[in-house]
Amino acid sequence: MASTSATVPSNNAPYSDLPPVISQLLEAKARKGLTFEQIAQKINKDEVWVAALFYGQAKGSPEELAALATVLGFPEDQLTASLGAHWWPNRGLGPIPPTDPVIYRLFEGVLVYGHALKAVIHEKFGDGIMSMIDCKVHVDKKPDPKGDRVLLTFDGKFLPYAKW
Amino acid sequence: MASTSATVPSNNAPYSDLPPVISQLLEAKARKGLTFEQIAQKINKDEVWVAALFYGQAKGSPEELAALATVLGFPEDQLTASLGAHWWPNRGLGPIPPTDPVIYRLFEGVLVYGHALKAVIHEKFGDGIMSMIDCKVHVDKKPDPKGDRVLLTFDGKFLPYAKW
Amino acid sequence: MASTSATVPSNNAPYSDLPPVISQLLEAKARKGLTFEQIAQKINKDEVWVAALFYGQAKGSPEELAALATVLGFPEDQLTASLGAHWWPNRGLGPIPPTDPVIYRLFEGVLVYGHALKAVIHEKFGDGIMSMIDCKVHVDKKPDPKGDRVLLTFDGKFLPYAKW
Amino acid sequence: MASTSATVPSNNAPYSDLPPVISQLLEAKARKGLTFEQIAQKINKDEVWVAALFYGQAKGSPEELAALATVLGFPEDQLTASLGAHWWPNRGLGPIPPTDPVIYRLFEGVLVYGHALKAVIHEKFGDGIMSMIDCKVHVDKKPDPKGDRVLLTFDGKFLPYAKW
Amino acid sequence: MASTSATVPSNNAPYSDLPPVISQLLEAKARKGLTFEQIAQKINKDEVWVAALFYGQAKGSPEELAALATVLGFPEDQLTASLGAHWWPNRGLGPIPPTDPVIYRLFEGVLVYGHALKAVIHEKFGDGIMSMIDCKVHVDKKPDPKGDRVLLTFDGKFLPYAKW
Amino acid sequence: MASTSATVPSNNAPYSDLPPVISQLLEAKARKGLTFEQIAQKINKDEVWVAALFYGQAKGSPEELAALATVLGFPEDQLTASLGAHWWPNRGLGPIPPTDPVIYRLFEGVLVYGHALKAVIHEKFGDGIMSMIDCKVHVDKKPDPKGDRVLLTFDGKFLPYAKW
Amino acid sequence: MASTSATVPSNNAPYSDLPPVISQLLEAKARKGLTFEQIAQKINKDEVWVAALFYGQAKGSPEELAALATVLGFPEDQLTASLGAHWWPNRGLGPIPPTDPVIYRLFEGVLVYGHALKAVIHEKFGDGIMSMIDCKVHVDKKPDPKGDRVLLTFDGKFLPYAKW
Amino acid sequence: MASTSATVPSNNAPYSDLPPVISQLLEAKARKGLTFEQIAQKINKDEVWVAALFYGQAKGSPEELAALATVLGFPEDQLTASLGAHWWPNRGLGPIPPTDPVIYRLFEGVLVYGHALKAVIHEKFGDGIMSMIDCKVHVDKKPDPKGDRVLLTFDGKFLPYAKW
Amino acid sequence: MASTSATVPSNNAPYSDLPPVISQLLEAKARKGLTFEQIAQKINKDEVWVAALFYGQAKGSPEELAALATVLGFPEDQLTASLGAHWWPNRGLGPIPPTDPVIYRLFEGVLVYGHALKAVIHEKFGDGIMSMIDCKVHVDKKPDPKGDRVLLTFDGKFLPYAKW
Amino acid sequence: MASTSATVPSNNAPYSDLPPVISQLLEAKARKGLTFEQIAQKINKDEVWVAALFYGQAKGSPEELAALATVLGFPEDQLTASLGAHWWPNRGLGPIPPTDPVIYRLFEGVLVYGHALKAVIHEKFGDGIMSMIDCKVHVDKKPDPKGDRVLLTFDGKFLPYAKW
């Protein structure tokens, strides 16, 4: 559902902590009426990764930026000037702890299940961690008569601790 | 691999923030040489939920506590005296932000992908949240020649915001 | 009591953390001399929900935004351009802990009565929480010769903890 | 449902921040199998106030302590020695922000609806606050086929700001 | 001592957290060469309350704003447009803990004498608090040959805790 | 009203941050049934200063400790062994910000009126501060038909800033 | 060594927390190629006090501001308009704890030697403090073949605690 | 002035963060009635360094510990067992920011004069810092008819920044 | 790989905490397509030091600034006007703890290995520290078939603690 | 240099956050007079890794624990009972930010050089991080006539960000 006049002011949270081009990208997306899923399909990526790119949390290759520019009808050189080869994501966004309930629930998951997850990961894999760098994150909709469910998946490489 | 003399001192982090019976449960588990997965199978639950119970983050029913006592050879009345009907989990454990790298990586996931997940959840489901209460958490091992992967899944009900 | 020249500067707390249209909405309301209660009656909603919308903490449907625009004599397209389909509330506003005494008193209620409320909720409902998502909040004036009283009500669905 | 051996260790959160008699009171309550509601009826008070007393957040009069001692079969002199005339509640309990989801939801209510409530209170009552001192707090169960609801009410006196 | 060109930049602490009209009021005061005491006498209020108004911490009635405008030669409609009926103080100003030594000393008074004051207030008045809402604050100069003294007085209503 | 068995456990807030003799002093006071005011009269000091001494925030001279020991029937050598010449107060007590409403209200006074007080003090005295070291603090009860009032006074020397 | 085009942008730390005239003063100083020591000699003050004035941490008298304006060739009325009679320093600057290594080292001195200094001050002077208000601060260069040394001196009045 | 029964409980701040031998050393010192200055003279060190040793913030050589043991009549092997070759100071003591007014004033000095000191140090010495490691700290009493003064000196080596 | 239109907005983190010339330098570098390594070779410095200079964390001499200006084709007087003799780095950049995973990993190294490094440094060198002022930092790429490795080296002078 | 009576109290920082066996290991090490380097050579590991093990920040294999027990003459079963198969390091130790100057200097390195290191790592390796899990840390002594130098090396695998 395109909204030709949609605006995303760049001086409110969380956009005030991101390059101004981010607000322009989100405006372009809204005006085209595209979802992250639709953009993702067109540029052959997952929608969560695309959304991470839109929030300045991932780095696009020249080809990915070009494809994105095409999909959004956004000037490619403007995109490259801002998020091109010289730009590296300054990752981490928003207050700690998060105040928005959607994000807070994820944080609550860390508070409540963090030690249990650590214990199970150690038991299944040994001394090491689940990488958040070599990690793919997915969101799926799981229809359910009692109310649809969000299926959130982190698929991260296990990294054993070095000894030396 | 049972270690008949395993000790879990109750005055170190994170045990110092939990009832003393927690350390005794973990000692019993270590002395029996049981994994969370093995215990889970015996009491018909998922290993992550069982681990959450062991870290004081879930509440067992009388039947679940009884089954657990049996599996561990732990005195049931002692378990019930501590974690029985009168006890309610005081959820949330460990420092904020977490310092242990296993748990920190989950927290980093919230920092880096939080806004992207919020955006995708809103787009797929509307204005609301993924419940962390009606939520099931799983850890699976996904063998991979380049290094095994941790598959961490949150399966939570979507809750739309009320209007009134 | 309309004040035709009322201004709400968008760069002071808490407005500096909200989209600029918020200040314009509040100015329009002040210039029309309407209360939240009056607006709420006209658009068939509760005044607390309406106030939450005015502070960027709730999401209006297209119909609700249209009705609001009509009531305030505010250009609908401008409202939609800012708070329309592409916009999702970034919930949570103001410092932690709150410094304003009105809001601090609510926070003090959590500090002083939080554990008592948790205990009573568990006892009456079991292991779970009162939802703040499926929750309706009301403020009523209760006349009292010794000084009027504020009747603040949270009407939230009980959500039992999942087991798996 | 009385559990004659229920224990409440006094060195875990939140009990480690409260006088040791608190744990003993909670143990006595659990062993008698009494709910806060039952105790409240017997001593003619509201269950939330009684729970606040049990968590060291309210001060009982000599008569109230005596009645409580009778109900619990707890030595009155021991209760008076700890929580008698010389004792004053040191109010405020638990971490800020709260980590337990039950208590956090209340805190989230302050974050999300705090400014809306402030705005409505000012509009309905003028410049002042809702007292959290002259305030009565209730929890009711509201049966609902779609899931029971928690009705949480704060009934506090409005206090206008002095001018001088 | 009027300084016709005095400036109060609105983008420095603490003014950056206050409406821009605050800086203009302080400039007007400086240019008129009036003290808070002189203004207070002219508008029949205490100088501390007047200063609180100047720092956005109190709400003036239409009559008080009009009187203030007259005293300062400040356009009344501009004052009303900013701080009129639609405006409510967002109370609480400056960092926590305060860094300015004048304000820090007051904070130090809370740190050092807070528990003593609590104990004496309880002993003299019972279980309750000194209101900071129904409270009048005064500053007097007490000449002393060994160095003048500041006499700071808080005159607040005692509020007993409700029981229910 | 003496309570011969009053106890003040030394391992709860705020006593856990104070020497154990503090709890014993408070127990002795409660068992004698003496108020701070009564003790103050007997040892010729103000009750607030006496309470500060009881909370480890003031240093007694040998004579003052001796007088206090006499009044309380407390072994003088035990008092001197703990709080004698070798002991210096470690001033500052309790969490920041305070959570107890009695103490929080004082803190709120700093947040709300701090800048106003700074402005008035500068205007009346020049560039400098009100000393919290050479400062006397009083609490008086001011009967009032609408509810008694607490009169809290800080009488502190003004200290001008050095220039060099 | 004058740099006629030196700029000091007023929107970077720490200048963004200070009145804009501060940046202009520092620019004027840089363009004149004057050191704080040279300015101090010309206006008959110590260089540390002068630097404190330049960082908005001290208040100049009309004569001092006039002298400073002359030395810098800065318009006196502009200086007075900003830092004149109506302006009072808002003291305290920079993050806590400090991140700049020069300032952090001083902070480290407080962390490491604070308790030792408190103990020695009490032993030499009794119960009281070293004033930071009636205090003169000096920096001297002490040549040393193994590397020059900074001699930093605080010369502050001892203030004994009042009793009352 | 020796107090043969002086006690220094090891479980109060700041002693609870230090090895138990620290409390014993302070008790021995009090019972001998020795000042830091007297001990310092006997072991040929400065009193501030000696006090730092007593607060666990400096490391004594075997000879220094032996001399200290002799002066205090303290068992040398006990001192060596605790603070001997295997022990290294865990430097930094007390809350941040400090709450004790003596220590806070030093901290205030950093807040108020930190940027001025940085500016003067850079101007006099270039780009680098005053070492807090190769630094000697002294406290002297400077008699003054208007009130004695504390002369606090930091004598630290200037360290220029490396370039590479 | 030069990008002639690369932009580095000066109002995003971390640039918003740095002088505006920093963004211009980074733009010039990107437009020239130069790496830090290439610039370093041309001006005879290490690339880490050069990058530190680009992030406002090191001070260039007039010769170094001139050489940098030449390499970048950047106006030398503009560089000197901003970062010349009158400018001193305000060191320390970014949030604490860091949220960007690259920087967080270094911080994690301090959390996990800090005490081990302290213990080994003390054992190898005695009581003192590794200087971060007289310290050279290098990053090298160490090819490895299992994945290239980052070799990060801190080469800092050991500074023994003074005694006095 | 063995000290047969060396003690390491387990209730001081940082030991109070670690299992009690840690203090016993450190005591055994001190009593044997062994350095980390000597232990490392005997068990064929690097001294930094060994020190990390001693501070509860690394996990030893059964063989490594056995070797360690042998070297220290420590009962192997006691070591295994505490740090055996059932134990997983709870990594991260000490306050944030660190107060000990040795550890703080490392933290300062992150504050000052963090962004420069991030920039150089990205430029040399692309979008990714230096692993702190697959990372080896070394401390070497580099003799230097102007003062020995600490050579601290982190040798960590570069991990590129996944895309999906």
Image (tube, coloured by chain):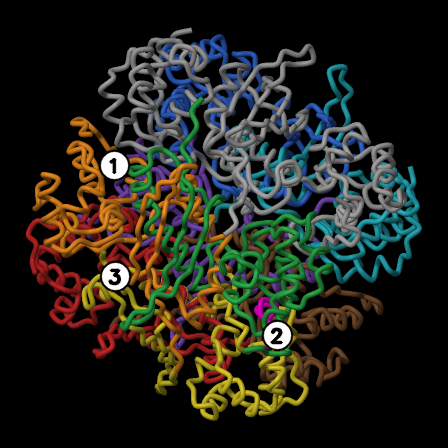
Chain colours: A orange, B green, E blue, F cyan, G purple, H brown, I red, J yellow
Residue J17 is a magenta residue: yes
Which residue in the structure is indicated by mark 3?
Answer: J161
Q: Amino acid at mark 2?
A: Arg
- Asked if one can make out residue E4 in the rendered structure from this viewpoint, the answer is yes
> Which circle marks residue I73 in the picture?
none
Give the CA distance from mark 2 to mark 1.
Answer: 58 Å
Does dot 2 land on a helix, a strand or a loop?
helix
Which subunit holds the residue at mark 1?
A: A
Residue at (8% x, 49% y) in the render: I5
User: Residue B88: where, in percent of width, then height?
Assistant: 64, 48
Q: Is residue H33 above or below residue A56?
A: below
Q: Amino acid at mark 3?
A: Tyr
Q: Nearer the viewer, residue G65 or E58?
A: E58
> Which circle marks residue A10 in the picture?
1
Q: Nearer the viewer, residue G69 or A8?
A: A8
- How many neighbours does mark 3 have within 10 angstroms: few (below 14), some (14-19), or many (20 or more)? some
Which residue in the structure is indicated by mark 2?
Answer: B31
Q: Is residue B111 above or below residue E109?
A: below
User: Residue A56: where, in percent of width, then height?
Assistant: 25, 48
Direction from residue E131 to residue J96 in the image, left or right: left
Q: Amino acid at mark 1?
A: Ser
Residue at (93% x, 50% y) in the render: F73
Direction from residue F15 to residue B47 in the image, left or right: left
Residue I118 is a magenta residue: no
Q: Is residue H81 above or below residue I106?
A: below
User: Residue A23: where, in percent of width, then height?
Assistant: 22, 38
Segment tinted magenta in the rendering: J13-22
Q: Quadrant of the N terminus of chain G?
A: bottom left
Co-location on one chain, circles 1 and 3 = no
- How many neighbours does mark 2 have within 10 angstroms: few (below 14), some (14-19), or many (20 or more)? some
- In front: label 2 or label 1: 2
Give the CA distance from mark 1 to mark 3.
Answer: 27 Å
